[in-house]
Amino acid sequence: MLNLGRSFNAEEWQPLQASDLPVLQIFANLAASALKNAQLYTESDRRRRRLTAFDSVVTAISTATDLDDLMRSVLDVVLSLTPGTCGALLLLDREHDRLALGAQHGLTAPCVSALQSVPLSVASCEEVVQYGQPMFRPLLEERNERAFLEAGLEHCAYLPLLAGGTVGGVLALYGDSALHLQADRQLLMPICNQVGFAIANVQLYADSQSERRKLTTLINSITEGVMLCDSRGRLTLFNEAAQTLLQQDSLPFGLTLTEMSERFVIRDLDNQVLPVELLPMARALAGETFHDYRLILLGASGSDTVMSFSGAPARADDGVIEGAVAVFRDITQQQKLERAKDDFLVVAAHELRSPLAAVRSYADLLLRREQQRSEADSRDVQGLTILTQQVSHMLRMVDNLLDLSRLDAGQIDLQPQRLNLVQLANQVLDQQRPAAGSRTLQLESDADEIWLLCDPLRIRQVLTNLVNNAIKYDASDREITVRLRSNLVEPFVDGERGDVGDDETTERRPLVQVTVSDRGGAFRPSNRHACSSASTARAAIGRKAWDSVCTSAAILSSCMAGRSG
């Protein structure tokens, strides 16, 4: 109660009169305005301090040269917001499940030692890392904080450094009993989140740089040339071997497929300029995986070089092609050696065929004469029979050599004729029955006659080789079955093989499947691609059976490519 308008020395107390209330209301309004202004000023000052703190943190982050500098600068800014405190930044090592000291300010040596490297299971701020929530409490000796108590500190504050909800570290503040009043939680938590993102970004950048250095070291250690491009076909990465093989002092990043073709004058083995869509990188970007793709390139010295390319697309987790990689090596000398070998085989096969043909003719003549003699000696007949068979086998090997040489040179001669495949298969089995001995050769066909337009000589050669191979390399006594299946269709779209669909415009051609079943050994499916080339078929199948299976596979590949069988 106020006694307005009266002297304080008055002995008698006078109560307020009704006329005094307006004056009192004026004073009350002035007091309320002063309180409101004080509150507004305090809030404004707090916001100013928050903006200043954020600006200081952003400046510290943007000007930091590395992670250590970043943590020291940020810690100085945070401690300036809480006078009279000391603290540290602890980084979480998830690989080893430990907290490591990143930066500290104002701590004694025992305190620094206590924070240097702490297993998370015994850390005083384990709950902060586990739950991602700040913690303010007195220091406790049973929480491994004895060193801080001995340094005269009383309270601690642990705040998580969050990056997208993931704890990357802890801000540790230490002070007196008023620490929980000095530390503004609403101010510090957003700053800690910003610092957490900054530290995570620096660590990610450092990790990415480390992985890039490892990748560069790995790629440069490869003796073959390696080139990578992005989804648009622009060169993004290459190794030192690629520069050496291409005879280039440097390769410009971002080189396009068209620029590559023009820069290196890329051609096929027929010396024809290669279209851009057939370049190794273009094939890989189209989703194709290929091996031993041979091309001619023009080096910086002006000399032609034969390169063997292998390539594959680089796919993202969702399967989208985001780039391609090509590996290549110089096979110029190997190409010359293979050509010299092929030339030698052609000459040798031609030179061998004529005398072998004469020997076989004379051996057949002697065998017939011996068989017609009334006093024929069985031992002579047997010897002449073996001689005739072996000479025929040698002639077949020579013919296979000639065929393989023609295949490599692209000069296989196909003569398509109308042919009854059932009749041809029966003839082949009849010819092979003497060699089969007691084993049964059986033909299964879903039709009495299957007429095809194909090269009879080549199809007979393929079928004979396959049956002969089954006889020679199947150690069991089980029967050998040749199965013919007709009434199949093969879809073609614009002359190319496609997937079967309901499109009425898709052309369908008749297809016959020929299967030779036995219990002998087989080559791995992973090696089947090699049998499309005579130069690689022998290595894929093995030396033991190359004379029959190699030739059959290569001839079939050539026939199918020419649509002649």
Image (spheres, helix red, strand yellow):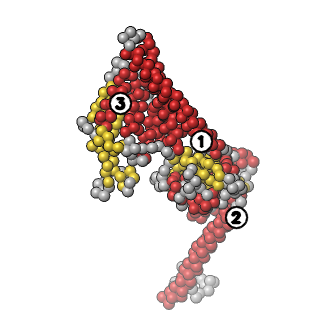
Front tag of 2 and 3: 3
Q: Nearer the viewer, residue 134 or 401?
A: 401
Going by the image, does 4 lie left or right of 110?
left
> Looking at the picture, does residue 300 appear above or below residue 370?
below
Q: Residue at 31% across / 37% down in the picture?
A: 421
Q: Residue at 44% across / 19% down in the picture?
A: 366
Please tell me which of labels 2 and 1 falls first in the chain: 2
Going by the image, does 467 lie left or right of 284?
left
Please tell me which of labels 2 and 3 falls first in the chain: 2
Q: CA distance from mark 2 to mark 3?
A: 85 Å
Q: Which mark is residue 428?
A: 3
- For badge 2, the amino acid type reads Thr
Give the labeled residue for mark 1.
Answer: 339
**Dot 1: what SS?**
helix
- For badge 1, the amino acid type reads Arg
Residue 307 at x, y percent in the picture: 61, 48
Q: Nearer the viewer, residue 257 or 533?
A: 533
Residue 406 at x, y percent in the picture: 50, 41
Q: Residues within 10 Å of mark 1 (few under 14, many from 20)?
A: some
Q: CA distance from mark 3 to mark 1?
A: 34 Å
Q: Which mark is residue 88?
A: none
Residue 184 at x, y percent in the picture: 60, 63
Q: Quadrant of the N terminus?
A: bottom right
Give the labeled residue for mark 2.
Answer: 63
In which image quadrant can residue 452 be found? Answer: top left
Q: Do callouts 3 and 1 mark residues in contact (Cβ within 8 Å)? A: no
Q: Residues within 10 Å of mark 2 (few under 14, many from 20)?
A: few
- Give the residue furthest to the right: 109
**Dot 2: what SS?**
helix
